[in-house]
Amino acid sequence: MTVRCDFKPSPFPTVILLLAGLLLPWGLASAAETPGATAPAATAPPRGQILIQNLGCPICHDVPGVTTPIREEAPHLSFQGEMVRPEWLFAFLKNPAPIRPSIRGRMPDYRLSDREALALTEYLRTLRDETPEPPAALRYRGAPKPEYVAAGKKLAGKDYFDCNKCHTLGGKQPEGNPEERAPDLDRIRHRFLPDFFLRWFANPTKYRPGTKMPGFFPDKDSGPDDILDGDEPQQMAALRDYLFSFGPVQVDGGYERARKAHPDVRPAEGRSLMVRLNCVGCHEVASLPNGKRIGPNLAHQGSRVRREWLVAFLRRPDIIKPEYNLMVGGAGQGARMPSFSLTADEANAVADYMSQALLAPEAKDPFNGSPPPADLSRQGEQLFAVKFCNNCHRIGQRPGGIGPNLTNAGQRLQAGWTVNFIQRPTHYLDTRMPNLKVNHEEAKALAAYLLGEKP
């Protein structure tokens, strides 16, 4: 039997279909509204909106009018323990890098400590489906068998599975759109556990639901008869050995060093961290609950923060609300805004979209762009003390609590939003901030103090 891979990557990115429902608010009018008229061409959504969608921001944040395909695109982690090397996984969690060019999203950098990365690695190592080990004769013994490498090379060639149609293999890149390519097969040796491929080749959709990877060995009569006497298990082992003949196993020693430094780390710590960091928002893990929105509502972000601050924050996120760490039992263990390694152009595109589309119309600047009056600021300072705001918020060297540090609030927040938020905090955010029962003038005074120059 001659078996070929006839799969061809779609020329149309999946995201086009997902965006179709978003076009109407951005200029696509219905021809039915004007009898006899021709519908105008659709206006593409702003680049910032597409980035918000592709990066998966709606997983953690409420972003009105924007959805995301990330949940469908991100790999399932339910069997991660039988798939990848722990050394690779630890290094990847510490320093994520692109793997699948066809995925529009990207794995963000959570700035994990060694302990956190180790805890996640140890938990993910436990995720297995208890599939029996392959027969001893087929297991990988530390080096590829020459006869298997030769047979695997034939199977991967154009006359059979034609792996190079989608994958980089043997230094040769596939033709077509680079963004539609499958993972680079020259780099998998240091990433995967060898015997996992005996399971993968038999049933790829079990491990990657929705994958475009064909199943070449769905039954015992699937493989070509003229290679290794048509023995499908041996053919799968041959493909494995051929792929493992490329490149070295790259080990930086970080995983073993972390294990020695933190011998008390247990998988349960990583399990908890998976939920706290909302990894389960993007990734499905059979033993864990689905994720939830743990970040602030971005419905009014364009009115809430200054554009220049937003661009800087998107490129280099930092902790604003220490309560996220305090609520979950220790610094460094809670939710945090990860870094998506945005370029300056990308950060500006996201900031442009938020500044134009995510607005609170009522948030008018009470100071008309001028610095807040000094006398009003002094009134606000007195109110700040009277209302016990310093119980939660730090300003300068004064002690504070779980609320955001307001020392440099004027660099981050806009005046109009701040005045309205002080009066109706839960209208804008899911927050512990109480309603201070202040009138508009008092709210202006507090805003003047928080956003102006402080002594």
Image: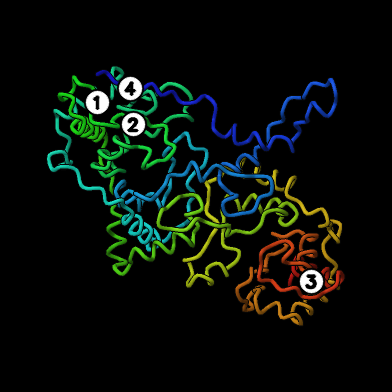
Which residue has dot 4 on it? 162
The location of residue 251, given as percent across then percent down, is 28, 48
Which residue has dot 3 on it? 446
Distance between the alpha carbons at the discs numbered 3 and 4: 68 Å
* Within-10-Å neighbours for mark 4: few <14, some 14–19, many 20+: some
Q: What is the three-letter code of the residue carrying label 4?
A: Asp
Distance between the alpha carbons at the discs numbered 3 and 2: 64 Å
The location of residue 128, given as percent across then percent down, is 31, 52
N-term-proximal mark, 4 vs 2: 4
N-term-proximal mark, 1 vs 3: 1
Quadrant in which residue 97 is drawn: top left
Distance between the alpha carbons at the discs numbered 4 and 2: 13 Å
- The disc placed on residue 223 is 1
Task: Determine whether 42 is above or below 361 in the image.
Answer: above
Quadrant in which residue 365 is drawn: bottom right
Task: Determine whether 144 is above or below 354 in the image.
Answer: above
Is 148 placed left or right of 355 in the picture? left
The location of residue 5, given as percent across then percent down, is 35, 23
Q: What is the three-letter code of the residue carrying label 1?
A: Gly
N-term-proximal mark, 1 vs 2: 2
* Within-10-Å neighbours for mark 2: few <14, some 14–19, many 20+: some
Say how the picture is coloured: rainbow
Q: The C terminus is located in which quarter?
A: bottom right
